[in-house]
Each structure stands twice: as structure tokens, then as C-alpha cells.
Amino acid sequence: MTNQILATVPITLGDRRILAPGKLLWLRACAWMVVLFFLVLFAFAPAGRALGPLLPKDPRISFMLNVGAALIALGAYLLFVRLGEDRLADELKPAALPQLLVGLAIGAAMFACVMGILVAAKLYRIEWHGLAPAWKAAGISIQAGVGEEILVRAIMLRLLWRAFGPVAAFAVSALFFGGAHLTNPGATLFAGICIALEAGVMLGAFYALTGRLWMSIGVHAAWNFTQGYVFGAAVSGTSFGTALSRSTVTSGAPAWAGGGAFGPEASFPALVVCFTVGLVVLWYAYKAGRFTTTQVGGASVVNP
């Protein structure tokens, strides 16, 4: 039973209704990608922004809003995929939920490894503060892990893959993910490149290997939580509030080496660790035949 639950499968791209094989499939897939992206985004993003100022400034309430937004994103994606593609979203099958736990462990371990390298290289220093409320950090991590993985991996990567194949899908979705972070505080071009290669490639690789979104969600959420709460470092230029410790870049450390104001994920060690993991996972996905055959509508077909 355990092997069945954790078993990986090819990505389900979809082959019905708007994605049915035929003329201008690439154009229909791209148009559906844009529509689905904004349908899901507008389903969960505005609610928290509208309710936030009206509710008490309690981190537990913020946590519930974040979790609620993540659940809305999941529900909206399931609904719109059912309506637009005439299928159940296999990438979010509850039977694969144990992969979420594996992803959480991988994400936490990777960031701890990065932080260990940064401290050993005297690029960062850590001051331990002891126990602190984790509501804000947990809520933000859950919402980002779920929301961003649905938007960038389940929608953008999958539908670009359907339109143009996996190479273009990985390249465009990774560039988009890196570029989207350039508006964050402390962002630099190098930070955007790091995000594109670290998260854009790595998180997409976990999705390609497993055919499910849960492991990517787990890695994403655990990385952010470990970075922002356990080590108290900046997460893409933002603070997660109270933390177990406070990690700060050493004065005079080059931004490319320590990440600067953007945080450790814009550092060279993070780039090396995460991109290496991404390449290894991509290799396993390739060996498993994920880039030659892909499951659509329950059948395996050769990719375009």
C-alpha cells in the first residue's frame, strides 16, 4: 500500500474539451493557461487583502486567512479544471498526500544545508532567540507553497508542456517565476536568476517526476518556513515576523555570495544546492521516461 501511495506517475496534461487534440492545440492550451491562471488567482488573492484590514491584528487570524486562501486556490483549480478540461485533477489526488511529507522533509533539509554552508563560510551569523509564535510564518508558507505551485507548476508548466513540450515549458515557467520575484524588496538580477534556477527548475522537476503537485508544495512551503521561522532570515526580501532565531548576512559580504537584503536564497550556495537537486531530480524523471511519454486522459502518449 505504501509503495502504491508514494508511486510516481507521468504528468496528466489533459486532452479533452479545450485541450482536445486537433487544430491550433498550442494556441488553445496557451489561451486556457492565461484564463485558468487568472481565474485561480482572482479566486483566492483578493479575499485576504479585503478581509485583512477589517480583522483584528492577531497572527492566528492571519494564519487562518492564509490557510483559507490556500484551500480556495485548491478548490478553484479543481473546479475549473473539471469544467474546462473535463477531468479530475490527478495532480492533486488525495492518495498522493504522503508525498507532501516527503517534500516537507526535503525542503527543510535543503535550506538547513544552505545555511550551514553560509555560516561555515562566515557569510552569515545566527542569533538563537528561543521559542516564538509560528502562526505568521506557517500561514505565509502554506499559502505561498499551495498558491504559487498551482499557478506556476500545475497551470503554467503543465499547459506550456501541452502546447510546446517540456523544454519550452521548463524554460518559460522558470523565467516567469524568477522574474516575478524581481519586484520584491532587495531583489537584483542575480536574485531573479537564482529563483529561476533554484525554484523554477527544482520544483518543476519534482512535479515532472511524481506527476503530482504535493511534493513540490511540500518542498516550497518547508523551504520558506525553515528560512523565515527556524533561521529568521529574509525570505525573498520579506520578514516572516517572530522566529526561533535571527540570521543576518555578514557585513561586507558580496550580495552574490550571501544573498544581500533579498535573503539566503539569492546566494551562490543556495543556487548550487538547489540547482544540483533540481538536475538530479530531472535526471530521475528522464530515466523514468517522463519526457518521452505523458499521461493524458488516462492514456500514455508520446510528447510533442
Image: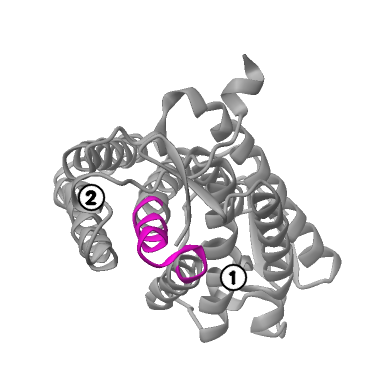
- Residue sitting at the far right: 120
Residue bearing mark 1:
197
Residue appearing at x 54%, y 34% in the figure: 100
Using the image as rendered, state which of residue 266 and residue 20 is in the foreground: 20
Q: Position of residue 97 (x, y in %)?
A: 50, 28
Cα separation, mark 1 vs mark 2, equals 25 Å
Q: Identity of the amino acid at label 2?
A: Val
Q: Main secondary structure of the magenta part?
A: helix
Tell me: 133 left or right of 12: right
For label 2, count other residues whose C-alpha is less than 10 Å away and answer few (under 14), some (14-19) or many (20+).
many
Q: Which residue is mark 2?
A: 40
Give amino acid for label 1. Leu
Residue 234: x and y in percent read: 54, 63
The x and y percentages for residue 16 are 24, 44
- Magenta stretch: includes residue 114: no
Q: Are marks 1 and 2 in contact (CB under 8 Å)?
A: no
Q: Is residue 83 left or right of residue 163?
A: left
In the rendered image, is residue 228 in sight?
no
Quarter of the image with the C terminus is bottom left
Q: Residue furthest top?
A: 1
SS assignment at label 2: helix
Earlier sequence position, callout 1 versus callout 2: 2
Q: Residue at x 53, y 56 (%)?
A: 204
Range of residues picked out in magenta: 154-168
